[in-house]
Each structure stands twice: as structure tokens, then as C-alpha cells.
Amino acid sequence: MRTSTSSSSAQVILVTGASSGFGAMSARALADAGHIVYASMRATQGRNAPQVAAVDAYAREHGVRLRALELDVQSQESADAAIARIVAEQGRLDVVMHNAGHMAFGPAEAFLPEQYAQLYDVNVIGAQRVNRAALPQLRKQARGLLLWIGSSSTRGGTPPYLAPYFAAKAAMDAVAVSYAGELARWGIETAIVVPGAFTKGTNHFVHSGSPGDVERVAAYDQGPTQGLAQEIMTNLAAAEPADADPTEVARAVVDVVGAPFGQRPFRVHIDPSEDGSNVVSAVADRIRSEFLRRVQLGDLLTVRNAGATAV
């Protein structure tokens, strides 16, 4: 159901990786809240054409400003073109939601080195390409929000067989934290929404990648680790409450975007399995704050209303 948002408070929002999962849920929820939302994905005229049709149908049926947008985060040219289209159509861009990513499941040793690089390229370098396309506009506006979809695995429980994905999400979190300090004086806020391991309700595990070295996988499927993959999946699912709802992540995104400028939370956890990430992150974020203050950079912890600045 669409909620009330005045035209003056409606924000122009880009969501990456919006063909499914948290991206699709968040794009619809943000549009329902009255914002102008670009649900971006790659291959809009190819394999994701049905998702484009679904976006268009949702916009018509619900009377919301939601539109699909071609954006392949593995292409700088594609990212540049997507941002240019948004700015040409709307005159501004208020929020960039970094959601595009891919999961992989299997023994760490069995993944080829280039598979690690490919996951890093999607989950980390992809966000960098989008930032390089979008941040000149946000800095020109002296106002904006980078909203990152992280993972509780960065600092919480880390079950085996997810090494490439966990490593990439940890790197993305580190990049997000650095950007937060670098952009604060430009009037650009940072928020990190941290979902836990939702084993149902999204396609993360169903569509996860697998190791390229099948012989190494076979080696781990016998001996002391025989059956471990199934143990991991079964026990992860068992730790998740029956009423765990991935749309809570989308609702958290809407709340962050709708919060007043300068009052948005730096980190929000939605983890029904309670793997402890919120506890560790609270300590890490506190230490970061204390250190920045100690080195006389405490103002970087608070976004500044910088006023329009030529770039």
C-alpha cells in the first residue's frame, strides 16, 4: 500500500541490483512511500526482460513512480549512462542504494582465483563504478545519501563455505566506512543496512554461484567434511525464526531514506538469527568515532550542510 509522501519530500533514488531480492523489494517499498525510484539491473532487454515487465506492471497497478533502468555495475560506461539518464530526466539524484551483489557457496579451496576476483568485481568494484558516476552530481548538489546493503557476516557469525561472498561483503563495508568520512563535509550521508542470513524469501542461496574446481568439491564431499554443505544449510535455516521476513529489510531502507537530513542512522541491523553482528559493529563503530575525534577529525562523523558547491 502506498504511503503519503509530499512531492517536496519525494526523493530521486537509484537502486542497483533491483531485479530480485532485497533490491526489488526495496525499490517497490520506496516507490510505495512516494519516492521516484529507478530499479536498475543489467540485461533489461535480455534475461531480465520479465523483471522489467514486472516493474512496469507494478508501477501501473499501484500508481507509483517506479521505472526499470539498464545498469550493469561491471561496466563504467553503463553506470555513467544510467546516472546521466536519471539526472537528465529528474534534474537531480538524491539517493544511491548499493545493493547489486552475488553470493557463492562451496569450499573456499575449490573456488578458482578468478571467481574470487569476479565476486569482488560485482560486490565491491561495481559500487565504485556507480559512485564514480554518481558522486559528482551529489557533490554538486551538496546533499545526498549513499545507502549500502551490507551483510551481518562482515562482523557476525561466519559459517563455512561462503568465503568469497563474505570476503567481498567485508571489503564493501570497509569501502562504505571510508566513503562516510570523505563525503561528510560535502553534505553526503552514509547509511549501512545490515541484513542477516535470510535463507528463504529471497533467491540469494538458491541462485548462489558454485566453485569452478569440481574435483576439489568432490574431495570435500568425502572424508571428515562429507555432508558438511548440507549441515550448514540445514542449521542456518534452523537458526532462522519461522516468521523471519525479508521485507523487513525493505522497510528499514524506507525508514532510513525517510529520516531527516543529518539524523539518519549510520548502521541498521535486520538479523532474525541474531548472529552477533550488531554487537561487534557497535564496538567497531565506537572505536572509529573515538579515533577520529582523537586525531581532530571528529567533524567527519557528522554530515555537514555544505550548500551548493561547484564541482
Image (cartoon, rainbow, N blue to C red):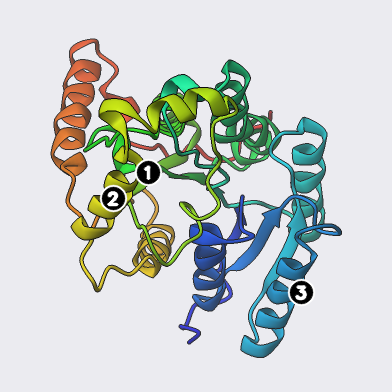
Q: Which mark is residue 53?
A: 3
- Crowd rating for badge 3 (residues with CA inside 10 Å; few <14, some 14–19, many 20+): some
For label 1, the SS is: strand
Helix, strand or loop at mark 3: helix
Residue 10, visible in the rendered structure: yes
Locate residue 287, reporting x and y percent: 17, 23
196 horizontally vs 207: left or right: left
| Residue that appears at 69% across and 73% down | 55
> Which callout, 2 or 3, points to the residue nearer the camera?
3
Residue 3 picture location, percent across and down: 46, 83
In this picture, residue 159 sits left or right of residue 220: left
- Residue positioned 33% across, 69% down in the render: 245
Return the residue nearer the eye: 66 or 48.
48
Disc ID at residue 192: 1
Q: Residue at x 67, y 31 (%)?
A: 129
Mark found first going from the N terminus, 3 or 1 = 3
Outermost residue toward the top? 295
Tell me the amino acid under the disc marked 3. Ala
What whole-number distance in Å separates the C-alpha atoms at marks 1 and 2?
Answer: 6 Å
Are the residues tagged 1 and 2 within 8 Å (C-beta)? yes
